[in-house]
Image (tube, rainbow, N blue to C red):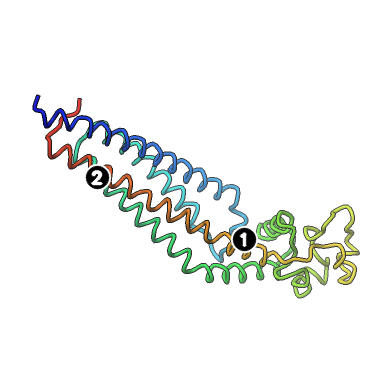
Amino acid sequence: MAPGRMETKPVIMCLKTLLLLYSFIFWVTGVVLLSVGLWWKFMLGPYMLLISNGPSTAPYVLAGTGAAIILFGLFGCFATCRGRPWMLNLYAVFLTLVFMTELIAGISGFVFRHEIKETFLSTYSDAVMKYDGRDDRSLALDGVQRRLHCCGVHNYTSWFSSAYFPLSGLPASCCISSSDCSGAELRNATVAAQKVYRQGCYELVTYFIESNMGIIAGVTFGIAFSQLIGLCLSCCLSRVVNANQYEMV
């Protein structure tokens, strides 16, 4: 066996090991995205009625992207073991597409964050105005107020102009303590002020978005640029195999 080929073997084995490790991590991120997409669809579905005017495609995009990453992660492992240049190049193309998609999604979310906040303000305000305590959007609104310990859009007075307040007062989900909050008290604006949460839900949600925007952006771009590692590894392995005409067993 030629000395050049002998020297190339450790390089190829090192690249294969690193690419296999990367492909496994890449596959795990696909499982995570698929799980998040399904969780979003089935667990957070009702709450999306308060964020968007129409059905959200976000959970389907996450689940679809996760499923595609799972398949191509497995393909990446197979391509690495086989060592076929065309397979490695195809894997590199897919990683490039994933990188561009995640980068565009991250930039779009950061640039249009104010529009997202305005849409949330509009849809949440509409949900308060049309609240009846029975439909899906009303139940989702109750869930938000209980979980976040908030009441109304900007504060509890947002409910005073709703169609629900003249008939039933503030919703029970605004109560600090359900055992110390009667229907008669909720219909009395002065008394209810001492029984309900004072902070509005819109402020809590937007504060969370603003305070964590740096972390969210950093994680998004970090995941996106991690694709470049796999891209470089697959291209390097393909070039080394081509240059030395190395045949894998």
Percent x, y of residue 23: 35, 38
At 33% from the left and 35% from the top, the residue drawn is 20
User: Which of the two discs, 1 and 2, sits closer to the camera?
Assistant: 1
Which one is nearer the viewer's eye here, 3 or 168?
3
Q: Quadrant of the N terminus?
A: top left
Q: CA distance from mark 1 to mark 2?
A: 40 Å
Quarter of image, res 10: top left
Q: In the rendering, which numbered label is found on residue 141?
A: none
Seen in the image, is 152 located left or right of residue 183? left
Name which of mark 1 and mark 2 comes first in the sequence.
2
Type of the residue with mark 1: Phe
Q: Quadrant of the C terminus?
A: top left
How far across and how far down the image is residue 187, in percent?
87, 68
Which secondary structure lies at badge 2?
helix
Q: Which residue is drawn at the image coordinates 82% and 62% (left, top)?
A: 196
Amino acid marked by disc 2: Leu
Residue ID at (62%, 70%): 121
For label 1, the crowd category at 10 Å Cα-Cα, with few meaning under 14, some 14 to 19 and many 20 or more, is few
Query: Residue 198 at x, y = what percent?
Result: 78, 66
Q: Element under label 1? A: helix
Relative depth, front residue between 193 and 110: 110
At label 2, counting other C-alpha atoms closer than 10 Å, the crowd grade (few under 14, some 14-19, many 20 or more) is: some
| Residue 90 - label | 2
Quickly name the residue at label 1: 208
